[in-house]
Image (spheres, rainbow, N blue to C red):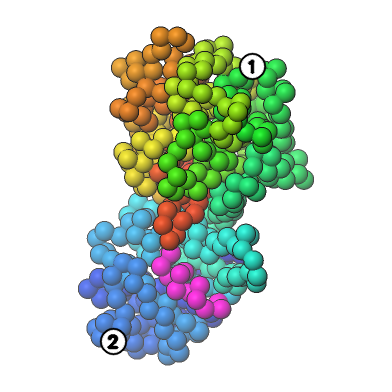
Amino acid sequence: MEYFATTSKASKRASDCVLVGVYERNKLGAGAADIDAASKGELKRLAKSGDVSGSLGRVAVLTNVPGVRAQRVVVVGLGKSSKFGATQFRKAVAAAIRAVSKTKSGQIFNCLTLERVGGVSKYYLARHSAEAIGDVLYLFNETKSGRKKTGMPLKKVGCAVAERGDVANAMLGAKHGDAVNAGVSLAKDLGNLPPNICTPSYLARAAQKLARGNNKLAAKIINETEMKRLGMHSLLSVTAGASEPAKLIVLQYKGNGKAAPVVLVGKGVTFDSGGISLKPGAAMDEMKFDMCGAAGVIGTMATVAALKLPINVNAVIPAVENIPGSNATVPGDIVKSMSGKMIEILNTDAEGRLILCDALTYSRRFKPAAIIDVATLTGACVIALGKHHAGLLSTSDKLANSMLTAGLASGDRAWRLPLGDDYAEQLKSNFADFANIGGRDAGTITAGCFLAKFTEGMQWAHLDIAGTAWTTGSKKGATGRPVPMLSELLLERAGALP
């Protein structure tokens, strides 16, 4: 997508569409006020008649508006002016783009970026706009037959700013938003592919493809033979029943010399049947999304590489299938992790932590400045936080706070949950160092306590995205989260934010 920023007036810019907003009680936004003046009160008349509404997300597409150079004026409701924040801004942009997507517009001029949004800079308004546009226009039709839908032919997006001094920051925001959107789209594509296509081997090839031709990004794929040599018996216990071989995918982005890297570890269970502890059949198809942690990490690496950030970032992705079979791990088995710790497996459906623990141990060799694992780990997180916040657990207040801040800034929010010995007690085992589950109570927290046993001495955080990684129902599909949050965190650490 091509982006530009300009101080042009809404009424003066020749475009297929100009986006403007109206608040409740018929209060015109900045761009709408200019359109109204140029059209001699047209918008005020339409607002009074009810043809234009200030209700958040309500959209009217007007054509042949007198005094306006654009072919269409898209008027979107912004809600109450006193409550118009970043969340409402993103919803308004998305609603406007959904309406525009039904046209054949190739260029739009977004004047919603002229609005005053409390505490939100022009950089973030432009970035939120780019990300909202990408989200609305995303299409996945790779596995459909016949003629593929091509979507809206949008090629150029303008961001309106009031002052010339805002142009550079708006352009930077749009550039960053476009790169984040590319990472989100890649994560969505990987998540939406069916499990018979997106296998561990497919994920490995996707990582290699991303690294190909990029001299700052390298990919390494570790096979099961090498995993056995490394002592990754916890990881291998999950894939024991599957015919598809496991892969440990390692991506290394070097943008800052010998500086200690941030390591992102992504859970890559390309299909999770639960293993011998078989899941119920209802909605089991959605277990193809159990690799969305891996997809999100790969998508974040794509964003980092596209922006050429001056930072070192590594990704470690354990990719497996969890399938019952004659060789499958059974409840009661005890396995030795790469760290040497012995684990009693009481439930084979608590498999994510079994692959993550070996990946976390492997990641120690990079001597990371920080390590963050991302996983669709527990149904308990969905019960606790729903689809809105990811669950965040960390032994580092500094790292946790920076992630919470990144979530708020990017609109990809998390909520911190506690850790502690009281919860870790639930993992006690009579026969091994600890068990892989701690009972029904505080399931998300005990999963975090399990992972914490492998991250002692490190700046570590765990992000449970079980509730945020995909949507269900008629809009079923991967969301691409937490690419926006992780990208924001890395942009901040790289000193790339304005």
- Left or right, 137 with reference to 96: right
Residue at the left extreme of this rendering: 25
Query: Main structural element of the magenta stretch: helix, strand or loop?
Result: helix
Depth check: give the residue in front, 28 or 400. 400
Residue 45's label in the rendered image is 2
Q: Residues within 10 Å of mark 1 (few under 14, many from 20)?
A: some
Q: Is residue 95 magenta?
A: yes
The image's mark for residue 311 is none
Left or right of 181? Residue 365 is right
Q: Between 323 and 460, which is closer to the camera in this rendering?
A: 323
Above or below, 40 against 315 in this view is: below
Point 46% across, 31% down: residue: 277
Residue 453 visible:
no
Q: Which mark is residue 231?
A: 1
Q: Quadrant of residue 61?
A: bottom left
- Pinpoint residue 444: horizontal percent, then vertical percent: 37, 31
Residue 431 image-quadrant placement: top left
Residue ID at (54%, 27%) = 356
In the displayed structure, would residue 481 be above or below residue 136? above
Where residue 203 appears, x then y in whole percent?
65, 42
Q: Over which residues does the magenta segment extend?
A: 93-105
Q: Around disc 2, counting alpha carbons within 10 Å, would you say few (fewer than 14), some (14 to 19), or many (20 or more)?
A: some
Of badges 1 and 2, the one in the foreground is 1
Q: Give the vertical position of 307 relative to 204 (above or below).
A: below
Does 331 lie within the magenta span?
A: no
Q: Which one is earlier in the sequence, the residue at label 1 or at label 2?
A: 2
